[in-house]
Amino acid sequence: MISRRRMLTAAAPLLGLGLLGCAPTGSTPATGQAGPAGSTNETDKPVKLNPDRIFNAEWETHQKTFMSWPNRQIWGKDLAYVRDDIAKVARAITQFEEVVMLASPGEEAEARYQCGSGVTVLTLGVDDLWSRDTVPVFVNGAGGLRGVDFNFNGWGNKQQHGNDGGVAKALLAALGMPRIQTPIVAEAGSLETDGQGTLLVTKSSMLNDNRNPGMSLEQLDAGLKDLLGVSKVIWFDGVYGQDITDAHVDSLARFTAPGKVLLDVPGEGAPVDDWSRSSEQARSLLQDSRDANGRAFEIIDLPQPDFSKIRGQDDDFLASYVNFYVANGAVLLPQFGDKKADQRAQGILQDHFPGRKVIALDIDTIASGGGGIHCATHDLPVVAV
């Protein structure tokens, strides 16, 4: 199994697989390192915004959820276990909305069998389960829904993506939906919105030569505003080069409503490290910032579990409750075996989504790959009226 959480030692062999644009092993970003002390990490220069694009918040009504059926080439001996996790998540979501499982040719029958009759299986070549990052980012507008293809490149060519790199284009073709092309390389796990014009992003996952060489923060900021119809982008520093995603925002900070942000914070006994410093930097920046409508942010801590009490003990295990998914009528979040922390997280989510059922799931194999429920799901919003 190839992990997403840490930089892959397997990156070097992938260079021989004919991947286009692979960066040399051990390359480091030449742009986008943390800004100077006191930097707001915001760019408020006037840009010509696109009024015909709305990037919906996840709590707005969905048509359906897309997921992807993982394959043996990526997961190896852990395939059966991770497929159990994916099927479990899919079955839970089907209680509230339709789930479409993308499965490679020849894998459809197994996906149908494990996920059950409530899940629709769509034949489409995929490599891995991370549909949050491979499925297009959907935007609403007067012309209906369109999909932004952010040119998935295996998180900076760290993992093979011969199929996953084409998922966005192929799915939009299958849906008969217009495709918006862009020179920007990004993943939806690096984009968090309140649905009212505010976007949270980590610099490390975008202002990085493994995605967008030569592009400045100002260029990326203006591009995201135009593509997604947002008017305010808040750029957290993130963490460079310590996991395959370069620190996606969806495991750091998530909106529960406009102006309200759940922040991933270290659990009991956690060391002071780059990840804890990233959390504190995000807190500081949010405290000093306003959203697109001038509101101050209410920051709610969502502590990680005590790592000495969880089931997953390897370094790659992603034990972040912030990687939850908001479905129609439900919130799905992981639980890790630290009963006190699991219950605390469920209570916090229930407080902030009072009209939804909070469902906690064991997803240890997904987590061992460095991801969570949010990473494995991607919502399709309803068409704006």
Image: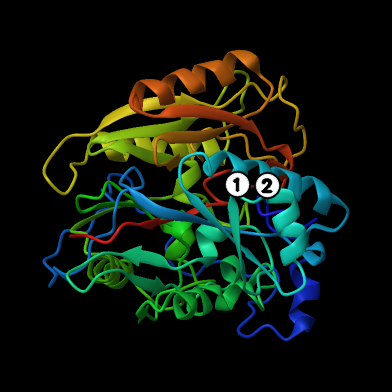
In the rendered view, would you say 26 is above or below 183?
A: above
Residue 87 - label: 2
Q: Nearer the viewer, residue 162 or 203?
A: 162
Q: Is mark 1 on a helix, strand or loop?
A: helix
Q: Is mark 2 on a helix, strand or loop?
A: helix
Residue 113 in the image: x percent, y percent?
Answer: 75, 53
Q: Residues within 10 Å of mark 2 (few under 14, many from 20)?
A: many
Q: Which amino acid does label 1 sit on?
A: Ala
Residue 155 in the image: x percent, y percent?
Answer: 58, 65
Residue 115 in the image: x percent, y percent?
Answer: 68, 49
Q: Which of 46 and 302 is in front in this view?
A: 302
Q: Are marks 2 and 1 in contact (CB under 8 Å)?
A: yes
Q: Quadrant of the N terminus?
A: bottom right
Question: Hey, which residue is sitting farthest top in the picture?
Answer: 340
In the rendered view, would you say 21 is above or below 360?
A: below
Question: Hey, which residue is sitting farthest front in the picture?
Answer: 117
In the rendered view, would you say 52 is above or below 356?
A: below
Q: Which of 149 and 65 is in front in this view?
A: 65
> Residue at horizontal 27%, vertical 61%?
383
Residue linked to disc 1: 90
Residue 71 is left or right of residue 237, and the answer is right
